[in-house]
Amino acid sequence: MVLQKRLMICASVFGVMAATPASAAPWVRGFVVGQYEYAFRYGGRADFSRAGEIEPGVDCPHGSGKHFANPAETKRTISLQKWRSAQEIEWITAPPGVEKTRSPTSTRFGLWNRAIAYRGYRRGIETYVNPWAADDPGQPEVNSRIGDGFNLDGKIKAGDFVSPDGEKGIDNALYRAWGCDAPWRGNGNANLDMRANDKMQDGLYTMVIRVSGNQNPRNDSDAVVEIGYSPDKIVKDARGGIATDYSYRILNSAQYTRMKATVKNGVVESGQVAELHSPRIAWFYDQLGDTHFRQGRLRLSMAADGLSATGLVGGYRDWRDLYAENTFAQDGGQQGVREHEDHVALYFALRRNADGMFNPVTGRYDGISSAYRLKMASAYVVDPAQLMDVPRHASEEWRRGVFEQIKANTIKGAQTRIPQDVPPGTTEAAVPRVERELVELPSADFFLKTLDRPHYPDGDVDNEGNPVDEHGKRIDRPRRHQQAGVSPMTLVPKDRQ
């Protein structure tokens, strides 16, 4: 990437514009996305709390969700399974002898992880892959009427949000469903927002936007806006912010959309398109992919100096994809215990609030209206010298394949109501973590015999495909399929695929 100096002629052009009406001329504005997150609004106060509640506010009257935040919350959840014995419930909540282990907190959380992964109507059903088979533990939902997003269906309904500037009919059911989920709720400090943005800024992926027209960048009735993936890593300035005016290539690939748009006083409004493709929020390689919004729209507000922009992109997303992307980045129990969120509860919240992409076969909606917030810095967005597809990391393809398999099993189970297996290599139910950590626990035998876990005919493997023994230790050479001499990241021209 080459730093290109802003042309000095811009100053004289603005001077002429101030004195005479703007003349029509071709123009281009480019931006690189520096912050990308769900368009949730925060109404809490960090310095306010009530007993057992976290930052109550106008969005979430009882504050953020607090699933698995303490032994009492965990006990409440596992007590919902009628097939658990009283001893099992008590020992999971407070494992006997846990303080004698090298890492009591890690051992306790590992056991919670395994236990909460199995909450079905009978033993043996892993309920992150089959959440429909569990009782709905309940997810606090947003009560506020104010919300960001778009009117996707052209209607004004009783349950719709009103935008901050007064527009009625805003469809953002994802905000209602997940807006009180602890790791996604905050005032610029939501844990998963920060994690995802940090990974994006450190090179996991890059998203760029290019706006062009033939009239004027502040007002143009016939503009074009493009959004897509860039193979070039984000460049930061000396203070750690997003540097302006660097060059980024935009790939006309699976994560790319070109739309007609209008510009009025610097606000870009795209037309609504049947399918809007763009990079999706991720903090691990296996989550990377296409948002694939249906009935998608894009809105940007470009600063007068052209150095920054903010905006929204949204549409209906398949809510089962959203569930899988959030649940299986690592494994459901690990993220649930660490982030105080319950993916089974999030599943039912998504299903309950789904409002688009009606499926005539099931009689249900497969989509949920959503909006993502964008903050951008100016950039030179250019076409690559040759057509190329989104790069793949050879060293991560094993993990990506496992992610796609567990997502497919989850969707199949939800459609057929037939419990699906956990594919090997996912670390679901803390396999093989628990086996490693229980060596020092006096009550280990009870948990190993009592708690359900996935079993595989060919033996256990870790999340990189390496065989492990009954104690979770590696017993063989790595099974990663990276070829000798092949770069971990390869850009493949389309004409060679």
Image: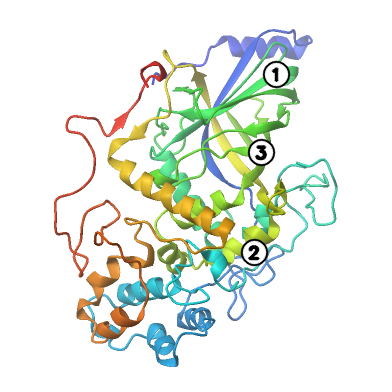
At a point 38% along the width and 72% down the height, the residue shown is 114
Q: Residue flagged by tag 3: what amino acid is it?
A: Arg
Q: Earlier in the sequence, mark 1 or mark 2?
A: 2
* Horizontal and vertical percent position of residue 335: 43, 62
- Taking 484 as reference, is 97 above or below it? below
Residue denoted by label 1: 223
Q: Earlier in the sequence, mark 2 or mark 3?
A: 2
Badge 3 marks a residue whose secondary structure is: strand
What is the quadrant of the C terminus in the image?
top left
Q: Quadrant of residue 205?
A: top left
Residue 63, labelled with which disc? none
Residue denoted by label 2: 44
* Horizontal and vertical percent position of residue 386: 42, 14
- In the figure, is residue 365 to the left or right of 256? right
Can residue 306 be seen from the camera position used here? no
Mark 3 crowd level (few <14, some 14–19, many ≥20, 10 Å Cα): many
Q: Residue flagged by tag 1: what amino acid is it?
A: Ala
Badge 2 marks a residue whose secondary structure is: loop
The furthest residue to the left: 476
Image depth: mark 1 or mark 2 in front: 1
What is the quadrant of the N terminus in the image?
top left
- In the figure, is residue 279 to the left or right of 219? left
Residue denoted by label 3: 294
* Horizontal and vertical percent position of residue 161: 78, 52
At a point 55% along the width and 28% down the height, the residue shown is 256
Whether pointer 1 and pointer 2 mark residues with C-beta atoms closer than 8 Å, the reply is no
State how the image is colored: rainbow
